[in-house]
Image (cartoon, rainbow, N blue to C red):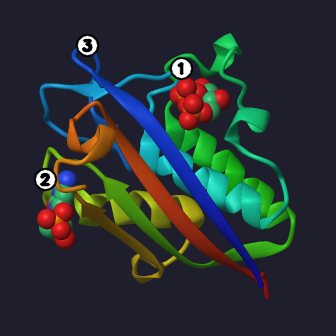
Amino acid sequence: MRIGHGFDVHQLTVDRPLIIGGVHIPHEQGLKGHSDADVLLHAVSDALLGAVGEGDIGKHFPDNDPAFKDADSSKLLKHVFQIVKDKGYCLGNADCTILAEKPKMAPYIEDMRVVIADLAEADKELVNVKATTTEKLGFTGRQEGIAAHAVVLLQPRS
Ligand SMILES: Nc1ccn([C@@H]2O[C@H](COP(=O)(O)O)[C@@H](O)[C@H]2O)c(=O)n1
Ligand SMILES: C[C@@]1(CO)OP(=O)(O)OP(=O)(O)OC[C@H]1O
C-alpha cells in the first residue's frame, strides 16, 4: 500500500471560468493558472505522484511548457493515473477537501466524484470530495483564491 498527499492553490480572477474537479461552476470569478487551473484535480494529481514517488505535477507538466497552456487538467490526471497503473498500483480510496468561501460546492460534488472516479477507472464510492469555507479568514476567506487538499491510498493491482 502507498499513501500520498497533495495540496494546491490558485488565485481567483475575473477573466477566467471556474473549473473544479472537472466541473464548470457558474461564478463571477475563475481560477488563474497556466492550465485550466483546476485546483482539485491538481491536488489529486500531486497526491498520486507523491504516493508512487514520482515528484509532483510541475515535474511532469512544466508551467513554462506551451503544451500545457490552458490544458484540460482531467487529461493531465488521466496521464498521472496511467503512471500509477504502470507502477503496479490502483486507487484504494481518495479523500479531498476544497477550501472556498464561495461559491457553494455542494451542488457539484457528486459530479466531481464521478469525474475523478472515471479517470481512476474506480467506483465513485472510493472518491470522497468535500468543501469548507475558512470562515472568512485568510486568502480563501477573502476570496482571493481557492485551495484543495487530497489524500490518496493506493493498493497493488491484482
Ligand atoms: N464553498 C463551500 C463551502 C462549504 N460548503 C458546504 O457547507 C458546509 C459548511 O461549511 P463551513 O465552512 O461553514 O463549515 C460544508 O460542510 C459543506 O458541506 C460548500 O458546499 N461549499
Ligand atoms: C498544471 C501546470 C501546467 O500547466 O500549471 P498551472 O495551471 O499553473 O498549475 P500549478 O498547480 O501551478 O502546477 C503545475 C503546472 O505545471
Q: CA distance from mark 1 to mark 3?
A: 14 Å
Residue 1 appears in the rendering: yes
Q: Quadrant of the N terminus?
A: bottom right
The vertical placement of 82 against 9, above or below, is below
Label 2 CB less than 8 angstroms from ligand 1: yes
Mark 2, Cα crowd under 10 Å, few <14 / some 14-19 / many 20+, is: some
Q: Residue at 56%, 69% (x, y): give it.
A: 151
Q: CA distance from mark 1 to mark 2?
A: 25 Å
**Residue identified by numbered label 3:** 15
Residue 7 is situated, as x and y percent measured from the top left of the image, at 54, 52
- Is there a contact, CB below 8 Å, between mark 2 and mark 3? no
**Residue identified by numbered label 2:** 104
The vertical placement of 125 against 27, above or below, is below
Q: Amino acid at mark 1?
A: His
- Is there a contact, CB below 8 Å, between mark 1 and mark 3? no
Which badge, 1 or 2, comes first in the chain's sequence? Answer: 1
Q: Residue at 85%, 62% (x, y): give it.
A: 86
Mark number, residue 34: 1
Label 3 CB less than 8 angstroms from ligand 2: no
Which badge, 1 or 3, comes first in the chain's sequence? Answer: 3
Q: How many marks on residues?
A: 3
Q: Amino acid at mark 3?
A: Asp
